[in-house]
Amino acid sequence: MKTEKDCFPFIFSLLKKTCDMSSTTCCISNVCNPQRSRLSKGYQSILLYHYKPLGFVDHYCQCCCIFWYWMNCYGRRLRRTGPEQLNSRNDLVSPPQHSRVNGWSLPLHTFQIVALLFYTYLAIVGFGIYIPLLPHGWKYAAYAVIGVLFAHHLVAHLVAITIDPADQNVLAKKNYSSPMPVFDRGKQKHVIQNQHCYLCEVDVGPKAKHCSACNKCIADFDHHCKWLNNCVGGRNYWFFFNAVASAVLGVFLLILVILYVFIQYFVNPAELRTAPQFERVIENNTWLAFLPVAPAETTAAGILAIAVITVLLGMASLLLLGHLLIFHLYLLGKKLSTFEYMTEQRRTQNTRDPESDVEITENTSVRMDPLQVGSCSPPASRNPSSFWCL
């Protein structure tokens, strides 16, 4: 039987060194040490890879999940996973928390701010510097195609953030100004049982899950996205998907434009100086940015340096967005949500390993540290871990 170490020897050697260097329990300690892969007394094992024979697409999607799990772990400081058992009744009672309306509810997530700033940077650099340098015919085609993609992405992205993805019954009853009632896990095993949420105090749909980051039930829950700072569910999934797809196409075309300008500078720079404003420029080393609205002089070195930086950033984002788009295309083909896919993987592992302490039911709710999206620590519950944007 293969182990994670057999599948990813280089990565695991690095992870093992990281775990050994820390005096505290690493958030990936279950990965570094397979013998500790099951946590007792209310903690669940975190399944990262399955050992049954897989097709290429299944293997690819699971590798994506592993990659993003580690990314989330290393994005946070190493910390203790918590006590082995709940020592008092107070540990079973969740304190009251306010629900979040949408992705604009405070606190804003760092990834959300980074995404918006990066979009702004690409728009300024692309439409302000490089597209105006294209030959006359290609220039307007690039303005039209890339402009439509960027505008489409912006609208879809903002709508996905702004929509309240809560279940319809939650929307009808919810008063976001009031804190959520206290949930006593000593009385109810799960937040949602028999399609009734004991926190939202309403009946919910069969695919609704209670996200403790948003602290409300999400209709047709898919995952909680840190880049949107909002849950993705039935009400905003297609806006999320359109935002990802348009981002992939837009970034890809913008990279092609910048690469063309970069190469053409060394092959035939005159092709990049066809704008009428260049007729008044005497020195060949002087270039103009932000044409034609606000021409600003710059140097060739500046144009090339920004091109290299933008292409590197664009390729990194294209790799991540491409992973995400392929994964969701796979889920759409299988007619699964992210939550259902991960739950099915855990259920499969549970049947193969009878000693596993994970319990999966239809009433399972999504457990995360309150207002801390994508915690690396195993939650103090037998419910599946949080699911966030890959």
Image: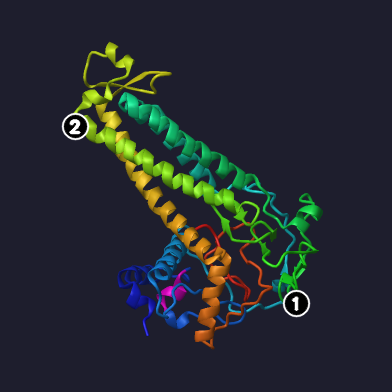
In the image, the segment drawn in magenta is 28-33
Q: Residue at x 66, y 72 (%)?
A: 364
The circle drawn on residue 266 is 2
Total tally of numbered discs in the picture: 2
Q: Position of residue 64 (x, y in %)?
A: 43, 63
The verdict on residue 4 being magenta is: no
Query: Of marks 1 and 2, which one's residue comes earlier in the chain?
Result: 1
Residue 7 seen by the camera: yes
**In the picture, residue 291 is in which quadrant?**
top left
Q: Position of residue 184 (x, y in %)?
A: 76, 71
Up-down relation of residue 40 to residue 240 (above or below): below
| Mark 2, secondary structure of its residue | helix
State whether the magenta stretch is mostly helix, strand or loop: helix
Q: Residue at x 30, y 69 (%)?
A: 10
The circle drawn on residue 2 is none
320 to the left or right of 187: left
Q: How is the image coloured?
A: rainbow
Residue type (three-letter) at the residue carrying disc 1: Gly
122 to the left or right of 11: right
150 to the left or right of 95: left
The 10 Å Cα crowd at callout 1, few under 14, some 14 to 19, many 20 or more, is few
Residue type (three-letter) at the residue carrying disc 2: Phe
Spot the residue most to the bottom.
354
Q: Position of residue 273 (x, y in %)?
A: 27, 21
Alpha carbon of mark 1 to alpha carbon of mark 2: how far? 71 Å
Quadrant holding the N terminus: bottom left
| Mark 1, secondary structure of its residue | loop
Q: Residue at x 38, y 53 (%)?
A: 319
Residue 123 seen by the camera: no
